[in-house]
Structures are given as structure tokens and as C-alpha cells.
Image (spheres, grey):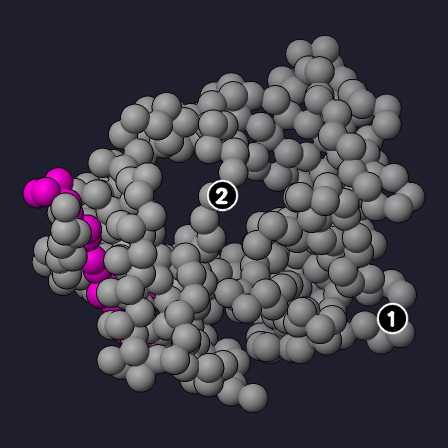
């Protein structure tokens, strides 16, 4: 039968596009459905800031009147301004087990991009690098696994991860049950995880002291996951660490004590930009936010003056990655301030 492709308008005509995912995976026992309202918000221009600088088209595939697949395509003007590579993206790429359906959807996505001057198509990226990236090619038989990493603000603290026992009815990790594990780091950076036997501390032995092999981290503070790496700051030794969750190894990304007149001190909260810049907020220090670029270069982004008794907290980007928010916890009067910085934060080369 002929495959029919229908185009849908973001925000107005997206019910079939949302439903396509459930149709494709409805017989997969390992699939956990995303919330419809979350997908709807992402595909609605009034709800998703990406549409302020991006253009999106949505396609569904039909065969014999039956919904058999979907695909999005998008152009991100900020990506083009930065990389100047004439590249658009495809995403939300879900089809029944039929190569022809996938090929026809990708042909339509490619043609849509070509009509708008794009020379290359990359994906799956739904809709940009701040959202879902990639595709599962093996391991479909396994249910989703979610782990949460934690730091500990103690001079002899641990580096932890929590493995939820499963997912709840809404498709989110069930944090009411699971295993708390603490890291042991070898001399070469290899990490071994040990389950904490008494995470509720009913025995009176602190959690960090229940596993003798656990490695000590000096004053754990900010922690952030980005693109397969967990970034962790430790204020006691002015370090920022990078833990590779696939390789299960950890390395020091920044060591302030190894630098004369370090440009970054009082390391605290951490956030990572879409481009991989690790932004570290200072607790005291010079009241700065300093970016550790992928090249290793340190780049001060902002400094708050006249608030020496405060600290910078809670740096976070908006979904578009073009606005940075942070707080001065105590400000000048003890009540604190919240700031917004508008990007873009990268200039074209």
C-alpha cells in the first residue's frame, strides 16, 4: 500500500503526531510512555522558547488509513549563527518495523529542509540539542534505568548514586525504593560502586562511614549531569570533577590548589551549557560565575560586586539556552537577588 505523509502545524494540529509514539510502542513491555502534556508543551510555540529562534515541521505516516510513524524536522537559527553549517535536524523519529516508512518520512524531512536552504540533515534531535538527542539501537528488551547522583557537604563526604527500583505510573523514576551506592575511586580514576547497607542510618553509623572502601570527597557541593558526564565540585580542595557514567571513571577537571592565583575559588553550584561549558558559581571568592570551556580554558562570565557577604547560587539556563539565571543568596540586605543574563553566549567563529 502507498504511504501517505501528512504535515501538522505545531501547537494546533498535533494530536495524531503525539499519538504516533504510543501506536508504535504499544506492544513493547519495556517502553515507558512520556506524558502527553509534556510533549504537547514542547510542540507548542507559546510554551517552548525554542520557537523564538527555531522553525519546526511535523509529519506523520499513514498506510491504509492506519498511523504507522512520525518525524519532526527543525531549523535552529542560533545553531546556524554559531556553526554556519547549513544544517537542519530531524527528530521524534518513531515508526513501525518497516524500513519503507522510515525512508519516506526522512525524504519528506530532507525535502522540507532543502526548500529552506539547508544542505545537511542531522539527527535524531528533538527539537534541538537542549532536548532529546540520539536513538536507541540495541537493548530494547531492557526497561529504562535511571540513576541519580548526589554529593555530600562534609569534609570526608562521599560521592553517591541512587538507583531507583523502577518507574512509577506516570513514567518517572520511583524514588520511594531503590539502592543508595557510594563510590570507591582507584588510583587510575576507575570507579567501583558499593551499596550502602543502612541508608536510613538506623544503626547510628553515618552513611558515609558504612563502606570502608569509599573514597572521601572534601566538601561536595554542586552536581550536574550533561551528555554522559556528571560534574561535581568540592569546595574543601577547590576542585571540579568529571565522572564518565559509561566508562565509570572520574578525573579532576579543575584544581584550584594547583594554580597560583587561581581565577576560580570557592567552587559551589554547577550547571552545564548546551555546548558543554561547565559554569561554576563561587561561594565567596570573587563572586563570579566562571566557565570551564571544553578546551580547558577558564572564562569568567559575570561578577557581582558590593555583595561580599553573599554567594552566587542556583545558576540555570532557560530551555532555549539563551538566558542564564542566578541568585546572589544574601544580596546587600540579606534578602537576596535574582539576575537574568541574556545571550547568546557564543559568537560565530
Q: At 47% across and 23% down in the image, what residue appears?
A: 166
Dot placed on the residue nearer the N-terminal end, 2 or 1: 2
Residue 137 got which mark? 2
Image x and y of residue 258, in percent: 89, 65
Give the answer, above or below, for where 158 lies relative to 250: above
Residue at the front extreme, as displayed:
1
Give the answer, above or below, for where 224 lies relative to 331: above
Q: Is residue 282 visible?
A: yes
* Residues drawn in magenta: 47-66
Image x and y of residue 82, in percent: 48, 82
Residue 259 got which mark? 1
Is the residue marked by circle 1 packed among few (<14), some (14-19), or many (20+) residues within 10 Å? few
> Which type of secondary structure does the marked residue at label 2 adopt?
loop
Of badges 2 and 1, nearer the viewer stands 2
Q: Nearer the viewer, residue 241 or 32?
A: 32
Residue 129 appears left or right of 32: right
Q: At 52% across and 34% down in the image, what residue appears?
A: 139
Q: Nearer the viewer, residue 334 or 49?
A: 49
Q: Is residue 105 magenta?
A: no
Q: Is residue 308 visible?
A: no
Amino acid at each position: 500500500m502507498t504511504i501517505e505523509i501528512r504535515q501538522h502545524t505545531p501547537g494546533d494540529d498535533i494530536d495524531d503526531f503525539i499519538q504516533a509514539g504510543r501506536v508504535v510502542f504499544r506492544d513493547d513491555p519495556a517502553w515507558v510512555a512520556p506524558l502527553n502534556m509534556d510533549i504537547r508543551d514542547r510542540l507548542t510555540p507559546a510554551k517552548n522558547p525554542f520557537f523564538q529562534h527555531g522553525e519546526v515541521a511535523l509529519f506523520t505516516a499513514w498506510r491504509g488509513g492506519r498511523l504507522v510513524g512520525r518525524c519532526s524536522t527543525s531549523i535552529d537559527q542560533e545553531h546556524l549563527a554559531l556553526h554556519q553549517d547549513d544544517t537542519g535536524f530531524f527528530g521524534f523519529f518513531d515508526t513501525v518495523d518497516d524500513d519503507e516508512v522510515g525512508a519516506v518520512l526522512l525524504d519528506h524531512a530532507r525535502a522540507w529542509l532543502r526548500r529552506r536552504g539547508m544542505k545537511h540533515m542531522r539527527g535524531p534531535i528533538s527539537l534541538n540539542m537542549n532536548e532529546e538527542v540520539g536513538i536507541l539501537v540495541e537493548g530494547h528488551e531492557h526497561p529504562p534505568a535511571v540513576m541519580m547522583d548526589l554529593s555530600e557537604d562534609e569534609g570526608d563526604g562521599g560521592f553517591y548514586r541512587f538507583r531507583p527500583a523502577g518507574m512509577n505510573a506516570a513514567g518517572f523514576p520511583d524514588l520511594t525504593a531503590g539502592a543508595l551506592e557510594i563510590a570507591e575511586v582507584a588510583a587510575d580514576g576507575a570507579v567501583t560502586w558499593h551499596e550502602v547497607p543502612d541508608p536510613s542510618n538506623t544503626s547510628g553509623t553515618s552513611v558515609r562511614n558504612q563502606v570502608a572502601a569509599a573514597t572521601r570527597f572534601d566538601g561536595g557541593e554542586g552536581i550536574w549531569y550533561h551528555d554522559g558526564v556528571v560534574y561535581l565540585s568540592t569546595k574543601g580542595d577547590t576542585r571540579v570533577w568529571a565522572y564518565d557514567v559509561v566508562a565509570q571513571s572520574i578525573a579532576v577537571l579543575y584544581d584550584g590548589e594547583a594554580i597560583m592565583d587561581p581565577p576560580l575559588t570557592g567552587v559551589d553550584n554547577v550547571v552545564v551549557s548546551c555546548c558543554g561549558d561547565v559554569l561554576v558559581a563561587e561561594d565567596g571568592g570573587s563572586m563570579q560565575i566562571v566557565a570551564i570551556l571544553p578546551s580547558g580554558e577558564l572564562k569568567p562570565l559575570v561578577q557581582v560586586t558590593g555583595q561580599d557577604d553573599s554567594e552566587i547560587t542556583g545558576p540555570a539556563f532557560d530551555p532555549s539556552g539563551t538566558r542564564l539565571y542566578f541568585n546572589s543568596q544574601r544580596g546587600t540586605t540579606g534578602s537576596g537577588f535574582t539576575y537574568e543574563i541574556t545571550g547568546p553566549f557564543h559568537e560565530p567563529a
